[in-house]
Amino acid sequence: SAIGNYDNRYGKNISFNTNFDYRAFRKTKIFANFNYNKYINNDFNNKNTYFQIGINQDLPTFGEETTKFKSSNLKVFTFYDLNNNNVFDPLVDRPASNIKVKINNTIFISDEKGNISYRKIPYNDYLIKSLENLWYTDDQKIKVDQKEVFITMSLEKTSIIKGRVEYMKTNKNHYEVPQILAGIPIIFKNKLNKTFKFYTNATGEYTAYLPLGNYEIFINNSILPQYVYIDDNLQRTTAEEGVAKVLNPFILKVKEKKVQVKKFGISE
């Protein structure tokens, strides 16, 4: 930080301050402070410099025994799974460099060999997920309870599939239903019965990033509002590399009201 003051009557004053802290070890910190001041007026001037360098060392705890902090080193190896078998094959697959991975609330970027290292983390549960859209991998929930933990993250090629949900036009004979299109879950299921869920936006559109393969697509009927139904609730498609597909829209229908007609006649 720096500050300067100029006054025609009382003179000039300049001040500069800075400090540095570096934690070399868990209980050891190196620090440095520097301060410079200078004062000038018509009769005299004065300046002084102050600096300090030192080490802070936490002393051991005396008295009651405290619980020792257990830490672990978590290592993640990321690779491009080019044959989609979830196993690193050196002759086919290759390490994934510069991949963004989130471990709980901390974001990492893999190095040129596909490695990520998270050192001295507490024993706990951790959620590991990729932040890449063009490559897919499952989120992993792991329990860190030993000194070294190693996991692999296989990234599969993905394709983009888009679609939309819309309401069929209604009239006065249909029930009045708020036609909200946002937040409708679209379910994709592959041949292994693994499901992927994506949600529509305010206009009913959705975009799915999916591993390559064959899928069945449908909407969970249980989430639809009362009096709303869908006749054709199953589509099929194939996610192909380099091909962005657009599916036919899912059409939501509103039930018609039951109108009772009474006939009146005059008997002679």
Image (cartoon, rainbow, N blue to C red):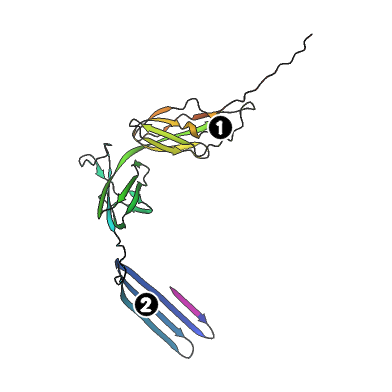
Q: Which residue is mark 2?
A: 34
Q: Which residue corresponds to the image point at 33% horizontal and 53% vertical from the top-left?
A: 124
How far from the left and from the top, in percent, is residue 215?
37, 30
Q: Which residue is mark 1?
A: 226
Q: Residue furthest top?
A: 268
Numbered label tally: 2
Measure the C-alpha gap from mark 1 to mark 2: 71 Å
Helix, strand or loop under label 1: loop
Q: Residue furthest bottom?
A: 43
Location of residue 193 with respect to 265 vertically, above or below: below
Location of residue 26 with respect to 156 vertically, above or below: below
Identify the image quadrant of residue 236.
top left
Q: Can you see residue 101? A: no
Q: Which residue corresponds to the image point at 52% horizontal and 86% vertical from the top-left?
A: 10
* 145 within the magenta span: no
How far from the left and from the top, in percent, is residue 153?
29, 45
Q: Can you see residue 121? A: yes
**Amino acid marked by disc 2:** Phe
Q: Which residue corresponds to the image point at 35% horizontal and 38% vertical from the top-left?
A: 158
Location of residue 225 with respect to 100 vertically, above or below: above
Mark 2 nearby-residue class (10 Å; few <14, some 14–19, many ≥20): some
How far from the left and from the top, in percent, is residue 46?
43, 87
Q: Which residue corresponds to the image point at 39% horizontal and 84% vertical from the top-left?
A: 48
Give left or right: position of 258 versus 3.
Answer: right
In the rendered structure, which segment of residues is drawn in magenta? 1-5
Location of residue 262 with respect to 236 vertically, above or below: above
Identify the image quadrant of residue 29.
bottom left
Nearer to us in this view, 113 or 10:
113
Magenta stretch: dominant secondary structure: strand
Give left or right: position of 175 versus 120.
Answer: right
Q: For the N terminus, give its image quadrant.
A: bottom left
